[in-house]
């Protein structure tokens, strides 16, 4: 059935009276300034679906469980200990149920593809499952059940800190040798082979978890696909890296690897101006997770400075303490306002909408590092799109860019979502919400009790 929108955001801007004809999961034809036919499914506002470039989906199950102050100065490192204790209770079926819950929430908020930074590989004892891709298959099953586009990013993890320090007990489920990891990559590709438009990249966890010789050994396993790595998230990490190498982590990567447009540097929170400029010139994307970064107290990425260097950005939900596409974009802007004590920072010039610029920048950056050759509402692009609820009071009277600004900053609601041409969210609810939530609740009850 063709889709007709009163207004839709196309690559050339907002257009009125837009019909999209879909075929084989793609947008086959776009017509504008055309009246609806009786056969058209009618909607008010159409925008492209966003990519979520960084997710640890199993962590959705621990959202809210790390908000009790400990006996010492709480930070990322104390939060990590809570996460390790949660991980110790998870079995594959529970991980799959939690992942499916996270994925329906992503779709309901306007994300249509996720980069799953997947590092929970082994059983609770740290022994490999007989099938190394046991948990990867659970992730793929969750994507199949919910319909979200999946870019699976198996994580290589070997050490607890720079210089090849042995892994800690809490990391035992993450650790592989390069040889094991090569097998895992092969099996992960098989795990997602049946999913429409699924991709597989590679994720060396961080420089503290991957030694230089291991990094060189595993990078060819990407087969030219995306490479995602945590870097410069916390100042302790930066200081430890400098003590090890006399360089900061992003500078080390720039000097010792061939960073290009396939790379996504996750967080990159603590960059010097020189690092920011050089990273921007590399063509890589900074994968920003502002809601998680705020929750963990990581710090604030200097988004305005990075964009002024020509840097490319995308957003991710990371720890999934909250899953909300608009909230990630809103948090990017609000953090800059708090630093500068001014407003409308991430618009490039007078008269430009902050929401439009953020939306289009993160749409492009997400597509780049999730291996989507084309994105947006254009012919032959995947039919990944979102309709906003025109009955939402926060959208009354809004036109064009004011629609995006009101979605992002006034928290207007998503109505429907299509992924690869299939409607998976209607009336703001995922079509499989009831069954997925029931399985999630059962899993969480068994984990916590």
Image (tube, rainbow, N blue to C red):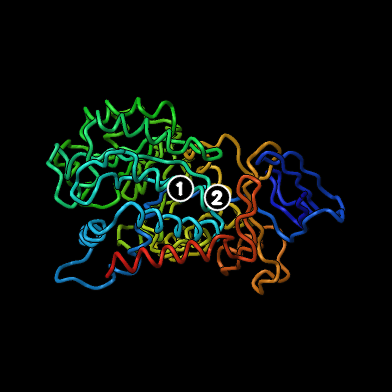
> If the image is split into quadrants, where does the C terminus sit?
bottom left
Q: Quadrant of residue 161?
A: top left
| Mark 2 crowd level (few <14, some 14–19, many ≥20, 10 Å Cα) | many
Height in image: 444 above or below 266? below
Residue at image x 73%, y 70%?
397
* Front residue of 427 and 337: 427
Quadrant in which residue 11 is drawn: top right
Asked which secondary structure carries label 2, the reply is loop
User: Considering depth in this image, is 308 or 75 the residue closer to the camera?
Assistant: 75
Q: Cβ–Cβ below 8 Å for labels 2 and 1?
A: no
Q: Residue at x 43, y 27 (%)?
A: 224
Give residue 334's mark: none
Q: Out of 216 and 382, give the one closest to the viewer.
A: 382
Q: Position of residue 58 (x, y in %)?
A: 36, 55
Residue at the extreme left? 166
Q: In this picture, is 93 found above or below 286? A: below
Relative to residue 229, is residue 332 drawn left or right? right
Left or right of 166 on screen, residue 274: right
Q: Position of residue 319 (x, y in %)?
A: 36, 57
Q: Does label 2 or label 1 sit earlier along the sequence?
A: 1
Work out whether residue 194 can be spotted.
yes
What kind of element bears circle 1?
Answer: helix
Frontmost residue, 97 versus 427: 97
Residue 141: which numbered mark, if any?
Answer: 1
The spot of residue 320 in percent (x, y) is 40, 59
Q: Which residue is mark 2?
A: 147
Q: Position of residue 424 (x, y in %)?
A: 60, 55
């Amino acid at each position: 059935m063709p889709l007709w929108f009163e207004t839709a955001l196309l690559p050339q801007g907002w257009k009125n009276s837009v019909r999209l004809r879909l075929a084989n999961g793609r947008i086959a034809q776009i017509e504008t300034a055309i009246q609806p036919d009786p056969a058209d499914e009618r909607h008010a506002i159409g925008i492209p679906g966003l990519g979520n470039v960084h997710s640890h989906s199993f962590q959705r199950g621990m959202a809210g469980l790390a908000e009790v102050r400990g006996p010492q100065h709480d930070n990322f490192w104390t939060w990590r200990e809570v996460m390790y204790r949660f991980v110790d209770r998870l079995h594959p079926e529970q991980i799959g149920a939690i992942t499916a819950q996270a994925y329906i929430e992503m779709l309901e908020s306007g994300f249509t593809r996720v980069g799953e930074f997947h590092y929970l590989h082994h059983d609770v004892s740290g022994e490999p499952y007989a099938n190394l891709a046991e948990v990867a298959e659970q992730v793929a099953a969750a994507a199949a059940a919910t319909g979200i586009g999946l870019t699976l990013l198996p994580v290589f993890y070997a050490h607890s800190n720079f210089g090849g320090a042995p892994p800690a007990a809490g990391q035992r489920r993450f650790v592989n040798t390069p040889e094991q990891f090569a097998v895992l990559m092969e099996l992960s590709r098989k795990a997602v082979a049946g999913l429409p438009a699924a991709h597989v990249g590679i994720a060396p966890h961080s420089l503290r978890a991957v030694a230089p010789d291991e990094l060189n050994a595993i990078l060819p396993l990407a087969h030219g696909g995306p490479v995602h790595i945590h870097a410069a998230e916390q100042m302790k990490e930066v200081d430890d890296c400098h003590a090890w190498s006399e360089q900061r982590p992003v500078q080390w990567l720039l000097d010792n690897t061939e960073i290009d447009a396939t790379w996504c540097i996750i967080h990159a929170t603590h960059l010097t101006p020189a690092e920011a400029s050089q990273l921007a010139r590399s063509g890589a994307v900074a994968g920003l997770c502002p809601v998680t970064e705020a929750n963990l107290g990581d710090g604030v990425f200097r988004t305005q400075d990075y964009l002024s260097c020509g840097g490319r950005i995308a957003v991710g939900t990371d720890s999934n303490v909250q899953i909300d596409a608009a909230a990630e974009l809103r948090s990017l802007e609000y953090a800059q306002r708090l630093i500068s004590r001014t407003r409308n920072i991430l618009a490039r010039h007078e008269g430009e909408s902050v929401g439009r610029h953020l939306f289009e920048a993160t749409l492009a950056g997400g597509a780049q590092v999730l291996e989507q050759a084309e994105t947006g509402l254009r012919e032959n692009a995947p039919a990944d799109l979102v309709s906003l609820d025109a009955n939402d009071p926060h959208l009354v009277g809004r036109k064009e860019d004011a629609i995006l600004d009101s979605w992002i900053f006034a928290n207007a609601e998503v109505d429907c979502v299509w992924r690869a041409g299939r409607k998976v969210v209607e009336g703001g609810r995922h079509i499989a919400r009831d069954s997925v939530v029931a399985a999630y609740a059962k899993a969480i009850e068994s984990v916590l009790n």
